[in-house]
Image: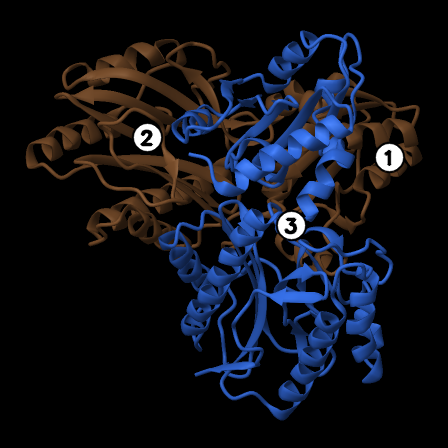
Chain colours: A blue, B brown
Amino acid sequence: MTSTAFAARQGALSEAMQRERVDLLILFGNNWHADHLRYAVDFGIQEGQGIALVHPDGSSVLMLDDPAECARARAEGLDCEVVFAPALVREARGRLSRAGNRTIAAAPFHLLPYGLLHGDEDLRVKDGAAIVERLLMTKMEAEIAAVRRAAALADEGYAVFRAAARPGRKDYELIAEIEAFFRTKGVPENFMIIGVGGQEVRGMAPPGGKILKEGDLVTTELTPCYDGYYAQICRTLVVGEASETQKRAFDVYLEAMLAGIAVTQAGVPASAVAKAENDVFRKYGLGVYTTSEYTRVRGHGMGLFPDQKPQILEDVHINLESGMTLIVHPNTYHPDVGYLVLGDSLVVRENGSEILCGTPRELFSVM
Amino acid sequence: MRRGLMAWDADELPRAALAARLARLREAMREERFDAFVIYTNIARGAGACWLTGFTPYWNEGLLLVPADGEPLFATALSKRVAEWISSVMPQGDVITTPKPAALVAERLADAGARRVGVLELDDFPAGHAHTIVTAAPAVALFDGAAAFHCARGAPDAYELLLIRRADALARQSLAASVGSTAVDPLALVARCEQDARLGGAEECFITLAPDLSRPGGFLRADRPHAFGATFALRVAVAYKGAWSRSVRSFASDAQMQQAFALADAALAAFSPASSSVLKREVESTFAHIGTVFDWSAEQPRGSYALATVASADGCAEGFDASAPFIINVDAELAGARWRGARLVEPRA
């Protein structure tokens, strides 16, 4: 069963391979980096590893080293040959050695298994980033529709999260509720981290068993996946009534996010979005909290990978293009209240952006 | 990504147990004349580093460098602020966050004058990292260290066994919860099952379903609507503090078929092979009186994989260790219907 987005991707990948004069593309993936395989063969790998060999005419073979994953790929009716390859590298290398004197590219190049390239005779393979990365970053409308649906699920998911958060609950119990909700909606994957507490909290991580108590800030980023595409929402809630200090701190993040969104449009460098967000923090004397000591990025791309290029940082000068899907999130530590997050997913357009998240931009309170 | 409970409990995994594992690896390294050992880790291949440190990165990747002596070093591309959290859940090893973990490892190898470096599963090691290491530390030669690691790891120690049993209990309980649930929609059933496992403290949970066992095909993800057939099966893999187990149960709506499935469940529960050489024979004899076995496989931790197929009906998998627990997966026909089951089997005392 192929999706509309996949059909569009197949055509785009074929065109890109022909443009770059590549005869064969090797794509590698696993449950962490599933995006390249998903792009080319529409399979979301869960266990083990996989390698796809893709030809410019769209024909491809997918090799998987896990027997159950192989059976699943066949049951899903993928539009490619599926091969069970317990010795994945040996199988792939054997097929490549029979490929003859062709121009071969691979991606993600740095993650490619060592044994695939190095052996009795080293294979000459070039980095396929030029073919794949732009396709992953800039989406077609069929892909944007999937991101839009994922963002709607993120909104619904955050409502479930708010309802689940209350004093006395453990942080991982909230994750259990949200995951159960997402499974009922056909969401197979979700990138999610959480922070619970006050000034001592300097970031988000997987849950460690913290119990929610009155006055805690509870931060999360939810990133559900629909048809392979991720969209993210970042929100913060307070257990009980928000203090004036918490409200004042939140206002800085809201102003920063709005500033970032306001400058987002095609042709603008990613650095400009980060600068707009960071300038708000600087205005309030909080500039130090925009550095890597306190925060990672001021947003990032999303698509078949939940955290893809372009990263929104002041030293990233990639120009935004219409069709890129991003989250703008000025998430960082605040010295008065601890780590605080706020972010919305959007689509970059020629003259601005299309906001995908509908959850109110507020500091929520739960009792 | 790992998004369930990730926490270190000294009672469950004491530092002394990890120190003993490290000592075993170093003994194996000396046998192979390795000056250092490198283990790659990410969520798909986290078992090797987790065995030595108790930690699996929830996202991204890392390299665990085990020098000939001193503390292991975990170099990861996760952000700087995450280092403090990693230290709190990783009881053995120092943590350094860096955008280029391989460059840092190469620097440490060069500083230590390392020449022979063992790499867990060299063929599967990311080529980019290998290139960085041998370029930045030209005196270093990389060798496959899978055999040395396997030799060091051996059968699980008492602490690993307890974690495996906990993971197994979560998998079985979550399946039992789904049996008792009133869900009529397969997605709701999967949700109920996963919720139960995560409420119990699962670090990760993979659930797939065969919605209609009368149809050919494997287990599917819950990423699209499915309709139940008269017989269906759920397959649950659960991680608890880095230890994995898997359980599969088949369900029937018809009372007669429920009885047949209960007999098969009981046969699977009683399955306890005497030795690895008779695994195939014992699988077939266990189910001989109730049906025909189409396929079976056994899974155990292997290198960086938490569960790898180590024995199978077609004989193409190898490496089964009869002294260690394993997951047995069985696909059989009972009274004209397909049945699938899997459970953790512990070796006979």
User: Could you tell me how far apart the alpha carbons at marks 3 and 2 are, in whole angstroms?
Assistant: 32 Å
Q: Position of residue A61 (x, y in %)?
A: 56, 20
Q: Position of residue B122 (x, y in %)?
A: 71, 22
Of all chains, the one bearing label 3 is B
Image position of B120 (left or right of B200): right
User: Could you tell me how far apart the alpha carbons at marks 1 and 2 are, in whole angstroms?
Assistant: 43 Å
* Pick the front one: B291 or B285: B291
Q: Amino acid at mark 3?
A: Pro
Describe the element under mark 3 as helix, strand or loop: loop
Which quadrant of the structure image shows residue B277? top left
Q: Residue B106 shows which numbered tag?
A: 1
Figure check: A323 above or below A20: below
Q: Amino acid at mark 1?
A: Ala
Figure check: A296 above or below B316: below
Q: Which badge, 1 or 2, comes first in the chain's sequence?
A: 1
The residue that disc 2 covers is B342
